[in-house]
Image (cartoon, grey):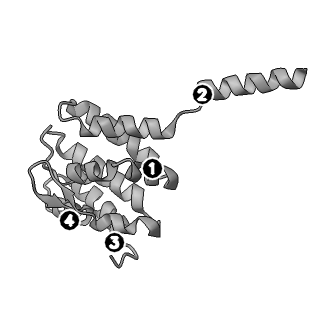
């Protein structure tokens, strides 16, 4: 009887405290994709993502859920919401965190994405373009992203 009571306590605790990772990722992607989202909300979502995308399974889920294209679009620096250098740098760091040291993710570096202005970009091109930024944080993030995107990558 004590064992059953303890199992119910554990089950209740788990239901109250375990997050639904795909749901969290969907919410973050929705914020990033929302053209009317305030720049502060986008920046906050990017900071949360940077921590999450270091996990291989979360990075894979993020890509599967369609978030990769959003990161690339923001990384180009042509985001219409005006997230600025801080947002661009955060998106570049997220891209680098997602792909580093995972061979399965290397092809993401060259995935073509339609940008908000109708152009086409990929993560490597976005990072290369960021190297010319006047913002030192953007340049630093670009170096990190490029290191992650091209390391051992023959795509």
Badge 1 vs badge 2, beta-carbon distance below 8 Å: no
Badge 1 vs badge 4, beta-carbon distance below 8 Å: no
Horizontal and vertical percent for residue 128? 20, 65
Mark 1 element type? helix
Mark 2 element type? helix
Q: Residues within 10 Å of mark 1 (few under 14, many from 20)?
A: some
Judge depth for marks 1 and 4 and give the one in front: 1
Q: Nearer the viewer, residue 97 or 26?
A: 26
Q: Which residue is mark 2?
A: 17
**Outermost residue toward the right?**
1
Badge 3 vs badge 4, beta-carbon distance below 8 Å: no
Residue 94 sits above or below residue 128 on the image:
above
Q: Earlier in the sequence, mark 1 or mark 2?
A: 2
Q: Residues within 10 Å of mark 3 (few under 14, many from 20)?
A: some
Gap between marks 1 and 3 measured at Cα: 21 Å
**Outermost residue toward the bottom?**
154
Relative horizontal placement of residue 116, taking residue 4 as reference (left or right): left
The circle on residue 125 is 4
- Classify the position of the C terminus by image quarter: bottom left
- Classify the position of the N terminus by image quarter: top right
Q: Earlier in the sequence, mark 1 or mark 4?
A: 1
Q: Residues within 10 Å of mark 2 (few under 14, many from 20)?
A: few
Q: Which residue is mark 1?
A: 61
Gap between marks 1 and 4 measured at Cα: 23 Å
Q: Which residue is mark 3?
A: 150
């Amino acid at each position: 009887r004590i064992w059953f009571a303890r199992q119910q306590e554990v089950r209740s605790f788990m239901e109250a405290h375990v997050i639904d990772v795909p749901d969290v990722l969907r919410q973050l992607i929705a914020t990033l994709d929302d053209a009317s989202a305030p720049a502060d909300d986008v920046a906050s979502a990017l900071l949360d993502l940077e921590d999450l995308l270091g996990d291989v399974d979360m990075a894979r889920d993020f890509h599967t859920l369609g978030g990769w294209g959003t990161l690339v679009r923001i990384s180009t620096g042509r985001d219409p919401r005006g997230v600025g250098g801080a947002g661009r740098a955060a998106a570049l760091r997220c891209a680098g965190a997602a792909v580093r040291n995972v061979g399965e993710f290397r092809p993401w570096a060259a995935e073509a994405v339609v940008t908000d202005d109708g152009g086409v970009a990929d993560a490597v091109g976005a990072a290369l373009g960021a190297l010319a930024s006047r913002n030192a944080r953007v340049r630093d993030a670009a170096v990190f992203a490029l290191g992650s995107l091209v390391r051992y990558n023959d795509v």
